[in-house]
Image (cartoon, grey):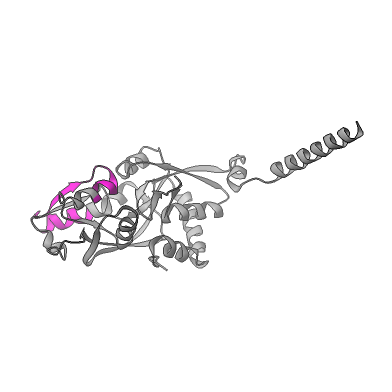
Amino acid sequence: MKKRLFVLLGVLLVVLMTGCDSNSVQSESTAKSSDPKVKKIIVGTGTQFPNICFIDDDGKLTGYDVELVKEIDKRLSDYEFEFKTMEFSSLLLSLETNKIDFIAHQMEVNEERQQKFLFNDEPYNVFPLQVVVHKDNQSIKSIEDLKGKKAIVSATSNSAVLLDKYNKEHGNEIEIVYSGSGSTDTITQIKNGRADATISTPFAVDFQNEQADAEQKVVGDVLSNSKVYFMLRKDESDLKEAIDRALKDIKADGILKELSTKWLGADYTDQ
């Protein structure tokens, strides 16, 4: 009887100790959620941008922009960030209609976007765009060689804006088509010859060749080396300033360079 009592007391002690530990250890996210002063921010991003925002083999959202936002979140005690994923073409409308609070998807500044939205001041990456073709293609060596060819890009993307501008300045010589399902559709169309080229980055091509056997290569000079930012609504000036403060610290700590090297294969940051 005494032996049973000792065993029960021992089990009870373990349970009590375990309960104390679990109650005393809270994740930063849980602690933020329980604080009524913390403002929840919905971050819009995608799932099909290689190295930037994508679903890994374990089914988790990750990539350069995703991990950077998580790092910013750690440093902003007044805010709690939550990701909302969607097609890239839906991001701008979702921001405009208050479904998300800012976009993390390698956004470049252009006149049309500036009229509607707010960009933060501190760039976090440089985005080198080049012509991309099938690895066996020997006829296309630059954007000039796309005359009479078909180029596939995602609608409203940096690549689409660049290609559309080039086309208008050169007599609309390139046939521009838009991908139906992100990078997968682009890879398929270039592989089977339905499209001749796309506009992308060296780090995206490297990732797709490794992960999806895309059989692509980069050709010609860099067409655009624009800085990229987070895009917010016009009424989010306080959030913009907070993001910029955190970004400056992340740059100074060397963490931004580490993230770029890890996810993009080199330091593409603006420091």
Q: Nearer the viewer, residue 240 or 28?
A: 28
Q: Quadrant of residue 108?
A: bottom left
Q: Nearer the viewer, residue 82 or 135?
A: 135
Residue 174: x and y in percent read: 11, 54
Residue 120 left/right relative to 177: right
**Quadrant for the C terminus in the image:** bottom left
Q: Quadrant of residue 52?
A: bottom left
Residue 122 left/right relative to 115: right
Image point (35%, 40%), residue name: 96
Residue 250: x and y in percent read: 50, 62
Is residue 40 located in the magenta-colored stretch of the structure? Answer: no
What segment carries the magenta color?
161-187
Q: Quadrant of residue 19?
A: top right
Residue 11 left/right relative to 196: right
Image point (47%, 52%), residue name: 69
Q: Nearer the viewer, residue 47 or 269?
A: 47
